[in-house]
Amino acid sequence: MQQDLQTHKPGAADRPYQGVGYYGQPALKASPFGWKTSGYIFLAGMSGSAQILGTAADLFGGPGMEKTARNARHVAMIGATLGPLLLIGDLHTPSRWYNMLRIFRRTSPMSIGSYILSGFGAFSAVTAAADWIGMKRVARVTQVPAALAGAGMSVYTAALLSSTSTPLWAAAPRLLAVRFGSSAMACGAAALSLGERIDGRPGNAERLDRVAMVASAVDLAASLASRREYEADHVAAPLEQGALGAVHKIGAIAVGAGIPLVCHAINAGRRRPSAALSVLGSLAVLAGGMALRTAILRAGNRSAERPADYFRFARTPPNTLNERKRTLLPDTAARRVLP
Amino acid sequence: MGAVKDIPARAVPKRALDYAEPILPGMIPDESELTAGVTIVPGRSYGFFTDTTLCIGCKACEVACKEWNALPADDVGLKGTSYDNTGRLSANSWRHVAFVEKIGGDLDAGEGRGTERNTTTMPPFQSNWLMMSDVCKHCHNAPCLEACPTGSLFRTEFDTVVVQQDICNGCGYCVPACPFGVVDLNVADGKAHKCTLCYDRLKGGLEPACAKSCPTDSIQFGELPDLVERARERVDSLHERGATDAYLYGAPGSPGATGDLGHLNAFFLLTDRPETYGLPSAPTRASNRVAPALGTGLATMAGLTMVAVALFAANRRS
């Protein structure tokens, strides 16, 4: 039917759009995802990034960071064990969870993620077990694939949300991935930093705080950039207004990225870094990470129920949707969809 | 009558006379030949052409769909906005007739906003009612199917998209993936549901229930190339007679068939902006966002890992 592409006859659809919808009925269905999914996204990011940091500590950190690597393997096991439970609990027919591994579909981040989680779980378990029974060399080898899967764990959830028709999630796929990834790395570093403080290795905690500081800076920059993106697409409202707006602005951005950035920056400039500031920064990162996932998930569900948001979003010329050009063409031009 | 000329006369096969008895011994083989003028052959592409200029809002399609597919009622009550009390497509409503009454200047964007018009001065076209029987679009590149991690959603031998109920585990990812808000989870049975384009009937040589029950042939079932041709002729004919608002939604190269979706196997003839019927004018293919998101995310992780390695290596030296 290729020759047919030029035969669209203009009609009422070529008139300017005047904001009319169908009795305010939602034009989309919101995802059924709730707290289990946002909790999983948080845990997956923290555990996946902790595994990366543990592997980096084991391979490059020298003997002083050996115990850090072991802590990281424990943190990784939180995601490897609780993660699948949360996901299966979120299925509406949980007894058929194994159908997730029935096929592989590269167009589906849910399918990609099922294999990332399986690989992460298996390699993390082997690494942790080998570490416990003293087979350091085995752990040293298996931690590498576990860390690679950990990188996937940190960011595939952003691809999962972006690859839907929900306007808020679909509006900025790349920036959402940067936010989830940097927040995951900050959470992993924060969890390990707290562990180092408890175990009394402040030197390692300071290095991890630097990692968290850099990741928080990236997170903050991506947050501000994505906010502009959402506003340009007129999909920002659910993330700006009401209680969710507060969770996002205060919880995810101010507490999740701002406070740790300030705390760790102050510590970085001091000759004697303060343990209290370090712990405060780490706790803020973890709380903010959870707030970010909750706000994005719930605001997305709300955005799907707002027909005006979707109709505006789905007028963007489709060929530029995945490019960085976000200028909305005049309505009549937007309607001309010929490639 | 011009309207009659529009609808191409489909030859009724001679064998129709074989089934003139009031009680038939069994199913009529290839019954769709008699009711829709099309033989259903696996491997070919089938779909719906819903011509909203012929819709009279009788909701026979909604009822026939519920009857055949044994779907329960969603919400027995009055919406209070129009004659539409179904509201939207759902797990239990696979056809939905939308009603829009066009009175006054607000809804009529053609003459500019604020133009006061009423039923006595508006041209007597479609009685100033827009009615549209909405349905799953059976997209060529269906985002629900591309999102399904279990392979429960699949493309049938009739080029339609169907949820296999014995495989679906109710993850619900197809629900936000759909750009038309069609697929829905039924929390009672924990599975995703949507129009199957009467997969079971097609296998038995029967036209889908909604199309068969449509008294005005507003819903036409057929082979996709035939339907597109028929639809284009209908648009041309309407334009010739002055109804220049008419256009196709979801046919190849038209609004609705955007964003890499290809075309929609269930497409529509509309006479107002798509949004008036609750349809997006330029829906997108969700899976096009997988690579940008995943790639950028992994690059971010690689960069941050390098930072960590550098800091840890410095730690080792110190």
Image: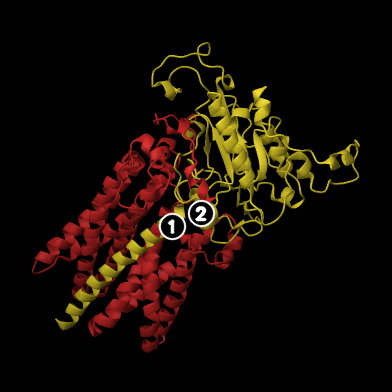
Chain colours: A red, B yellow
How far across and how far down the image is residue B254, in percent?
A: 49, 41
Q: Is the residue under label 1 in contact with that under label 2 (CB below 8 Å)?
A: yes
Residue B83 position (above or below residue B40): above
- Using residue A262 as the reference point, say whether residue B208 is left or right of it: right
Residue A55 x %, y %: 32, 78
Q: From the viewer's side, name the closer residue of A327 and A27.
A: A327
Q: Does residue B80 appear left or right of residue A268 in this picture?
A: right
Chain ID for label 1? A
Q: Residue at x 49, y 34 (%)?
A: A25
The x and y percentages for residue A217 are 21, 59
Nearer to the camera, B126 or A2: A2
In the displayed structure image, the side of residue B205 where residue A38 appears, left or right: left
Q: How many marks?
A: 2
Q: Is residue A157 visible?
A: yes
Question: What residue sits right under mark 2 in the picture?
Answer: B173
Q: Amino acid at mark 2?
A: Tyr
In this figure, which residue is indicated by the disc labeled 1?
A160
The kind of residue tagged 1 is: Leu
**Callout 2: residue from which chain?**
B
> Residue A256 at what x, y percent from top left?
27, 55
Question: Which of A199 and A95 lies nearest the eye of the viewer?
Answer: A95
Q: Element type at marker 1?
A: helix
Q: Outermost residue toward the top?
A: B120
